[in-house]
């Protein structure tokens, strides 16, 4: 039987979560309806919370006045390659930190943690000078190289926790059966860690997809720009093209939403992993 106190607590919890959901969803909803409004209706008074006339003019203008398809392709290539390479390298480094003992192990972990405490924009100047010397400014490979380097520390720390939760007996049994160390890793441990690896890949992909400061600093040519840099270009000294920016924002959010929708099961498993089924 539900007591009055427990019923009240449940109602308050539902109301609080409902209010939080509205606060969270409303900015996305506003961007969506703004993208479908006609240019003259975006700042009409009084404000309308539903378009009186749905229009695709902002989407047409977006592709007519900018190379948005090129920006999407650049972001997709850079984010996918950087996330894949960073996840693979982080998996190997996390395996070493979880399975082996060596003198500088604690120092390496502390160094990885300290890098997460430093704001990224502080390193913009040194990174830009380094890319200039390497002649990798306005080069997608240079941007991917930096994204990989930036993503490895946190991803390594995260994957190390997954490796630590997998018993050593699994790979020891595989090695007794004739597998090498790498064979045991890729044939036995990696399949067990699939949710964690997918969660790490998605984390890296979303970070690379949404990153702004480095892409704005390193990418000057229009054909090399990524989506965040392109969105920043809709802001001029005196005006902001809200219609085209809203349309671009909607198209930018869609890939990450689809990625989370298809991989949500792995993300939940990866974030809650802590036991190995026998």
Image (cartoon, helix red, strand yellow):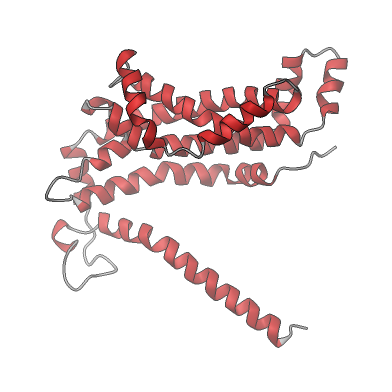
Please give the name of the residue rendered at 74% of the width and 34% of the height, measured from the top-left corner: 164
Vertical position of residue 181 compared to residue 156: above or below? above
- Residue closest to the eye, 74 or 57: 74
Pick the quarter of the image with the N terminus: bottom right
Please give the name of the residue rendered at 32% of the width and 14% of the height, measured from the top-left corner: 133
Left or right? Give the position of 136 relative to 189: left
Residue 195 location in percent, x, y?
65, 38
Q: How many marks?
A: 0
- Residue closest to the eye, 215 or 153: 153
Residue 74 picture quarter: top left
Left or right? Give the position of 147 relative to 278: left
Pick the quarter of the image with the C terminus: top right
Residue 100 location in percent, x, y?
75, 22
Residue 196 picture quarter: top right
- Residue closest to the eye, 60 or 42: 42
Instruction: Residue 73: tell me if it is visible.
Output: no
Residue 41 picture quarter: bottom left
């Amino acid at each position: 039987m539900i007591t009055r106190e427990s019923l009240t607590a449940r109602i308050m919890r539902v109301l609080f979560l409902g209010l939080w959901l509205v606060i969270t969803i409303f900015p996305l909803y506003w961007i969506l309806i703004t993208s479908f409004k006609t240019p003259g209706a975006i700042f009409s008074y009084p404000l309308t919370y539903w378009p009186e006339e749905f229009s695709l003019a902002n989407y047409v203008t977006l592709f007519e006045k900018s190379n948005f398809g090129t920006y999407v392709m650049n972001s997709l290539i850079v984010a996918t390659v950087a996330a894949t390479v960073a996840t693979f390298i982080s998996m190997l480094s996390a395996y070493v930190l979880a399975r082996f003992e060596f003198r500088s192990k604690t120092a390496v972990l502390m160094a990885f943690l300290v890098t997460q405490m430093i704001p990224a924009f502080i390193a913009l100047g040194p990174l830009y000078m380094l890319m200039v010397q390497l002649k990798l400014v306005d080069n997608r490979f240079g941007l991917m190289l930096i994204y990989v380097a930036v993503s490895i520390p946190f991803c390594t720390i995260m994957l190390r926790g997954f490796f630590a939760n997998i018993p050593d007996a699994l790979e020891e049994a595989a090695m007794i059966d004739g597998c090498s160390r790498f064979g045991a890793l890729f044939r036995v441990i990696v399949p067990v860690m699939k949710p964690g690896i997918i969660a790490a890949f998605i984390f890296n992909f979303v970070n690379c997809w949404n990153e702004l400061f480095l892409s704005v600093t390193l990418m000057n040519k229009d054909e090399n720009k990524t989506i965040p840099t392109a969105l920043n270009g809709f802001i001029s000294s005196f005006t902001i093209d809200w219609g085209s920016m809203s349309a671009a924002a909607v198209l930018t959010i869609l890939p990450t939403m689809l990625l989370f929708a298809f991989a949500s099961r792995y993300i939940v498993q990866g974030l809650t992993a802590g036991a190995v089924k026998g």
